[in-house]
Image (tube, grey):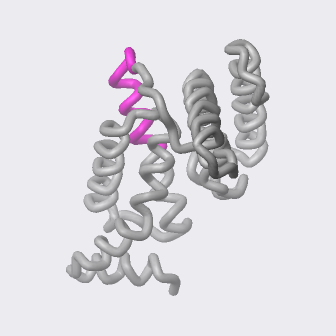
Amino acid sequence: MNEDSLYIKQFLAGENEGFEMLVRKYQNRVLNIVYSLISLDRESEDIMQEVFFKVYRSLKFFRQQSHFATWLYRIAVNTTYDFLRKRKSFVSNDGGILEMSAFTGCGPRDTLLAKEKETIIQKALLTVPFKFRSALVLKDIEGLSYAQISKVLCCRIGTVESKIYRARRFLKNELLRSGGDMA
């Protein structure tokens, strides 16, 4: 039995500490996924809280046929998608948390360039349709395997590969269109 299963068992036995341990273990990853999808600070935190509220209410129905993280990420992606559907006119703020875009330099110029590059990539990422963006975020930012992503998004591995390919193509085209030289 893995650590997550123990926490779930503990929670189902009436000990809230098990759920608290799950939240501590996964809250940063869920927040990173949500923020990478919408790039809105406060809303990302609200969505993360809603995700864990849904998990709290639904954990008794989790059959443990897949990994807990896969189930959790699916809830995170679906909850974020619901948020976007409800909020048709969403506008991104500046900034982002794309680790893949960070420079390794350590001077003030390098820090400024890294922040500028991060902002450009985050804005371009937001132009990628959600159904493709979610697969790209799970792969390139969260580092999930194609098999894990197929479970989170409820589609075949070939479909995941296609979505990631198309997302990267959208991203590259947007970067080229906006004059960015990072494509």
* Residue placed most toward the observer, 16 or 126: 126
**Residue located 54% across and 68% down the image:** 67
**Residue located 41% across and 27% down the image:** 84
Instruction: Look at the magenta stretch and give its main secondary structure.
Output: helix
**Image coordinates for residue 162, horizontal then vertical, percent:** 77, 35
Location of residue 5 (image quadrant): bottom left
* Quadrant the C terminus occupies: top right
Residue 174 falls left or right of residue 51: right
* Residue placed most toward the observer, 98 or 127: 98
Reply above or below: 108 against 132. below
User: Does the stretch in magenta take in 30?
Assistant: no
Taking the view exactly as shown, the residue that stands out farthest to the bottom is 1
**Image coordinates for residue 69, horizontal then vertical, percent:** 51, 63
Residue 28 falls left or right of residue 144: left
Q: State whether residue 88 appears in this view.
A: yes
**Residue located 46% across and 28% down the image:** 94
Magenta residue span: 77-90
* Residue placed most toward the observer, 138 or 163: 138
Location of residue 66 (image quadrant): bottom right
